[in-house]
Amino acid sequence: IPSLSLLYKLRKLQPPSVAPVAGATPNHNDRIGLIKGDITTLAIDAIVNAANNSLLGGGGVDGAIHRAAGRGLIEECRTLNGCDTGDSKITNAYNLPSKKVIHTVGPIFDAIRPEKSEAKLKSCYKTSLELAARNGIKTIAFSAISTGIYGYPSLDASVAACETVKEFLDGENGSKMEKVVFVTFEEKDVRSYNMTLPRYFPPN
Ligand code: ADP
């Protein structure tokens, strides 16, 4: 059964409960932020790319990251032998202002089995955070994984993202991460995060 938010998306409507909200804030609280803008401009320890299984570049945010990083990134990605859906791999950032890029492969949204997509999407956030912690990364910016070409409903995706980030921050490696920022280009994602963030993270 397709989720309610997918149905709204298909009808190009927003859920009726969505009221106009204040814009994104990079300091939702000390450890969580939301930015409406271009992830390739962020000078942060790591940005998380919504890659595909080949890790050889694609459209959307993946294309933007490869364009901004330059040839070095694709050359390093070629040595990685791809990446499974739900898994993550780390590279240098080349011409980007961030220190590292974490490439994670989100699921193509499956409206018949949304719970399978949800498990994979949560795994993207979990494996990215674990990889980041192992690599000494203290500040990380996530793109809105799977919510573009891969069709994951924005509101459901924000819930999966927040739930997984909260679990990580509350867990044994959580204290290693100082700041997690959600980054999106799109008003629909900003609205979703503005509804979901306060449910998981107390605002400042
Ligand atoms: P996926 O294939 O995982 O769905 P997409 O790249 O198609 O990934 O979309 C993920 C999200 O990233 C979309 O909301 C898209 O608008 C957004 N996006 C595209 N380019 C950028 C960018 N430079 N910075 C931040 N977000 C971006």
Image (spheres, helix red, strand yellow):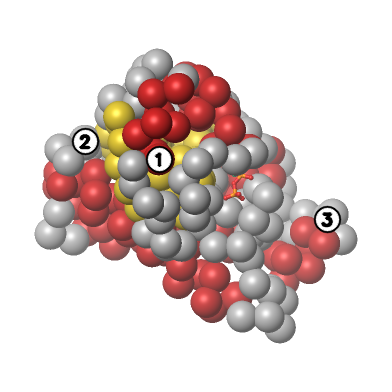
Gap between marks 2 and 3, in whole Å? 37 Å
Q: In this view, does 125 lie to the left or right of 137?
A: right
Query: Depth-wise, is mark 2 or mark 3 nearer the camera?
Result: 2
Out of 4 and 141, give the one closest to the viewer: 141
Query: Depth-wise, is mark 1 or mark 2 nearer the camera?
Result: 1
Of label 1 and label 2, which has the lower sequence position? 1
Q: Measured along the vertical axis of the image, is residue 70 above or below residue 133? A: above
Task: Tell me, yes or no, if residue 195 can be seen here.
Answer: no
Q: Position of residue 110 (x, y in %)?
A: 64, 72
The dot on residue 138 is 2
Disc 3 is placed on an element classified as loop
- Outermost residue to the right: 11
Q: Where is residue 196 in the image (x, y as percent from the top left)?
A: 52, 54
Disc 1 is placed on an element classified as helix
Q: In which quarter of the image is residue 60?
A: top right
Residue at 29%, 62% (x, y): give it: 167
Q: In this view, does 51 lie to the left or right of 11?
A: left
Task: Tell me, yes or no, if residue 171 can be seen here.
Answer: yes
Residue at 44%, 32% (x, y): give it: 74
* Image quadrant, ligand 1: top right
Disc 2 is placed on an element classified as loop
Q: Quadrant of the N terminus?
A: bottom right
Amino acid on which the number 1 mark rests in the picture: Arg
Q: Which residue does the numbered mark 1 point to in the structure image? A: 78
Q: Which residue does the numbered mark 3 point to in the structure image? A: 13
Gap between marks 1 and 2, in whole Å? 27 Å
Gap between marks 1 and 3, in whole Å? 40 Å
Of label 1 and label 3, which has the lower sequence position? 3
Query: Depth-wise, is mark 1 or mark 3 nearer the camera?
Result: 1
Q: Position of residue 85 (x, y in %)?
A: 46, 62
Amino acid on which the number 2 mark rests in the picture: Lys
